[in-house]
Amino acid sequence: MEIGAHAGMVGIRDTKQRELPDAARPLLVVPDASFTALLQKLGRQG
């Protein structure tokens, strides 16, 4: 998984798709507050 942040947003994409050109690789973009909430939630699991 690749994660990058810029201007209050976080981009996430699957590194298993490296053979595809960048323009064809799906990218999930979420607000940084949502990404932080996700990480906090995952940290509480187990």
Image (cartoon, rainbow, N blue to C red):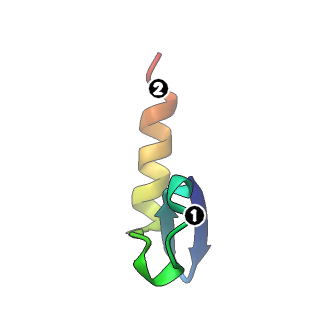
Q: Secondary structure at mark 1?
A: loop
Rendering coords of residue 20 (x, y %): 49, 71
Between 2 and 31, which is closer to the camera in this rendering?
Answer: 2
Rendering coords of residue 45 (x, y %): 44, 23
- Residue found farthest to the top: 46
- Left or right position of 19 against 31: right
Rendering coords of residue 11 (x, y %): 49, 69
Q: Which mark is residue 36?
A: none
Disc 1 crowd rating (10 Å Cα; few below 14, some 14-19, many 20+) is few
Q: Secondary structure at mark 2?
A: loop
Contact, CB < 8 Å: mark 2 with mark 1? no
- Left or right position of 42 against 5: left
Hey, which quadrant is residue 27 in on the image? Answer: bottom left
Rendering coords of residue 14 (x, y %): 49, 56
Find disc 1 in the rendering and name its residue: 18
Instruction: Count numbered badges in the picture.
Output: 2
In this view, 32 is above or below 40: below
Of the residues tagged 2 and 1, which is closer to the observer? 1
Q: Earlier in the sequence, mark 2 or mark 1?
A: 1
Between 32 and 15, which is closer to the camera in this rendering?
Answer: 15
Disc 2 crowd rating (10 Å Cα; few below 14, some 14-19, many 20+) is few
- Left or right position of 24 against 8: left
Q: Amino acid at mark 2?
A: Arg
Query: How far is the residue under mark 2 from the one under mark 1?
Result: 31 Å
Between 22 and 37, which is closer to the camera in this rendering?
Answer: 22
- Left or right position of 39 against 28: right
Q: Which mark is residue 44?
A: 2
Q: Amino acid at mark 1?
A: Arg
Residue occupying the point 42% across, 36% down:
41
Residue occupying the point 44% across, 71% down:
25
Residue occupying the point 49% across, 40% down:
40
